Structures are given as structure tokens and as C-alpha cells.
Amino acid sequence: MALKEKLQNDLTEAMRARDEVRSSTIRMVLTAIKNEEVSGKEARNLSDAEIITVLSREAKKRREAAEAFEQAGAKDRAETEKAEGVIIAGYLPEQLSEAELKEMIASAIQETGATGPQQMGLVMKSIQPKIAGRADGGTVSSLVKAALSGGN
């Protein structure tokens, strides 16, 4: 079953179960997917890989919003954002561990022949398709930078 169909089926189930947080979160994600589909010159259907990219972006928004609300002292709003993030994470592929990321980065550096921080873009371009939706871009970026700078 396609990821978008699964989201739509899960929305129906959440509505039947009167699960407000789950149904509103899935609605929001489906809206983000729809917006992505109609952006650009012509409407199109997103592939599962593109949907995972949208889900990753939405999950990141929830993490950042939860942090901002916590810093502002709005604990209840932070908890809502975290709950939404957990629901979205359920649709994402399993996240890579830091050890797995470092291993993938090392092989990407070997493949590309990168020798220093100035070739970070080359390594990121090589590794991005392999980690799409499975790791936070900021974390990957800092690990690549550390690896190219000679640190670990």
C-alpha cells in the first residue's frame, strides 16, 4: 500500500476512534503533501520517497516548535508538538544510529575521494539519497564536517 493511502486509511480510523491528536496530525500531514503536489508548474502525485521528505520536514518542524515552546515555558504546547512528532515519526523509516551514520559517511568520503572540509558538498550530495528520511540533516552535516576536518 502506498504511503499516502496508508495515511488516508489511518485518518479514517483515527476519526472513527475519536482520536483528536492523531486525526489532526494526519490531516496536517496530508495537507502538507497536497500542497507539495500542487506546488510548481503542474500538479503531480508524489512518490513514497517524496512523501517521506515531506514527513521528515514536518517532523523537524514539530521538534523545533516543541523546543521553542519549552524555552518559552509553554509546557502544554510543547507536549502537543511532541505528541504530533511521535505520530509523524511512526510513518518515517527507522532512524539511523550515530554509528551507522559515521560508517556511511566514511564510505561516502572514500567513494568521493573527498580530502577536506571544502568538499563537504560533494560528500553530502553522495550520502543524501542513502539517508533520506532516516536521519536529521543537521546531524549528518555536522558529522560530515567533523569527519572531513579530521575529527570523529
Image (spheres, helix red, strand yellow):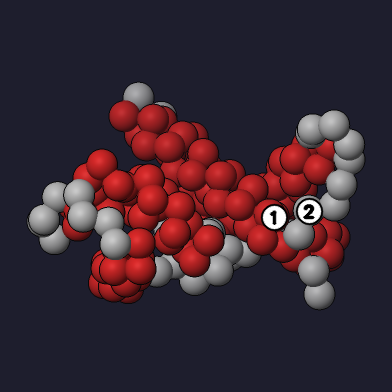
Residue at image location 55% in from the left, 69% down from the top: 93
Residue at image location 37% in from the left, 37% down from the top: 67
Write down the quadrant of residue 123 in the picture. bottom left
Looking at numbered disc 1 in the image, what kind of residue is underneath it?
Ile
Identity of the residue furthest to the front in this view: 113
The answer to whether 98 appears left or right of 149 in the picture is right
Q: Position of residue 6 (x, y in %)?
A: 78, 67
Write down the quadrant of residue 101 in the picture. bottom left
Q: Are marks 2 and 1 in contact (CB under 8 Å)?
A: yes
Viewer-proximal residue among 109 and 22: 109
Q: Quadrant of the N terminus?
A: bottom right
Task: Choose the circle earlier in sequence order: 2 or 1.
Answer: 2
The answer to whether 52 appears left or right of 72 in the picture is right
Query: SS of the residue at dot 2?
Result: loop
The answer to whether 1 appears left or right of 103 in the picture is right
Q: Position of residue 147 (x, y in %)?
A: 19, 57
| Res. 108 in view | yes
Viewer-proximal residue among 74 and 85: 85
| Res. 79 in view | no
Residue underneath mark 1: 51
Query: SS of the residue at dot 1?
Result: helix
CA gap, disc 2 to disc 1?
Answer: 6 Å
The answer to whether 137 appears left or right of 7 in the picture is left
Q: Count of labels shown?
A: 2
Q: Position of residue 9 (x, y in %)?
A: 83, 65
